[in-house]
Amino acid sequence: MNREIGSLVLEVIEGDITRADTDAIVNAANKHLWMGAGVAGAIKRAGGPEVEREAVAKGPIPVGTAVETTAGNLPHQYVIHGAIMGQDLQTDASLIAQTTKSCLDLADSLGLGSVALPAFGTGVGGFGLDDCATIMVREVVDFATRAKSVRRVALVLYGQAACLAFQRAASAALDG
């Protein structure tokens, strides 16, 4: 699913974020930036241990903020690590919104043209998929009004259920 929001294209894709055709990919991180399972594990396996070493050296960071690292063996310019949770591995709606905003703003400040984000907090964080989709799509729509360099945001989801939830959220947000 591709939708235009002003000069920005929002894509909702089912797939492997490490294979996204974007300038950067986003890791759903904890505040210490250790890379364990889920999206982080996939990025660490594909990018190599240097991605985690570089990330951990920049941590800890406040929950809701983001930092960038190189992408190791990945074909991207950067991995953006968005701290969606603390050591308690819990998140909430406000943290998902703030982390999404932080990651998009960081991609823009790096002068990137495209960025791929996963569903924040729906794995280890246990946050509901439909609520996450609504929050993240709303943040992308808000971001479209202030984006300077980013022209494409891909929401790359693991599994059909996640993809459908984000497609529904995008349709609801953009079709009124």
Image (cartoon, rainbow, N blue to C red):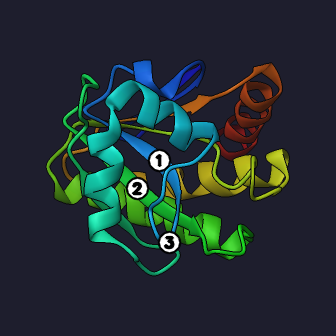
Note whether 76 is above or below 112 in the view shown.
Answer: above
Give the mark nearest the N terminus, 2 or 3: 3
173 sits to left or right of 145 = right
Kind of residue sitting beneath label 3: Lys
Local packing at callout 2 (Cα closer than 10 Å; few below 14, some 14-19, many 20+) is: many
Local packing at callout 3 (Cα closer than 10 Å; few below 14, some 14-19, many 20+) is: many
Q: Residue extending furthest bottom?
A: 62
Residue 29 or 92: which is nearer the viewer? 29
Report how far apart the C-alphas of labels 2 and 1 lie in the structure: 5 Å
Percent position (x, y) of residue 24?
Answer: 30, 38
Note whether 16 is above or below 150 in the view shown.
Answer: above
Q: Give the SS element for disc 2.
A: strand
The residue carrying mark 3 is 31
Q: Residue at x 52, y 76 (%)?
A: 63
Give the mark nearest the N terminus, 2 or 1: 1
The residue carrying mark 2 is 81
- Identify the image quadrant of residue 131: bottom right
Note whether 144 is above or below 17 in the view shown.
Answer: below
Kind of residue sitting beneath label 2: His
Which image quadrant: the N terminus? top right
The residue carrying mark 1 is 27
Q: Residue at x 61, y 53 (%)?
A: 136
CB under 8 Å between discs 2 and 3:
no
Which image quadrant: the C terminus? top right
Percent position (x, y) of residue 168?
Answer: 78, 34
Q: Give the SS element for disc 3.
A: loop
Report how far apart the C-alphas of labels 2 and 3 lie in the structure: 9 Å
Percent position (x, y) of residue 89?
Answer: 71, 67
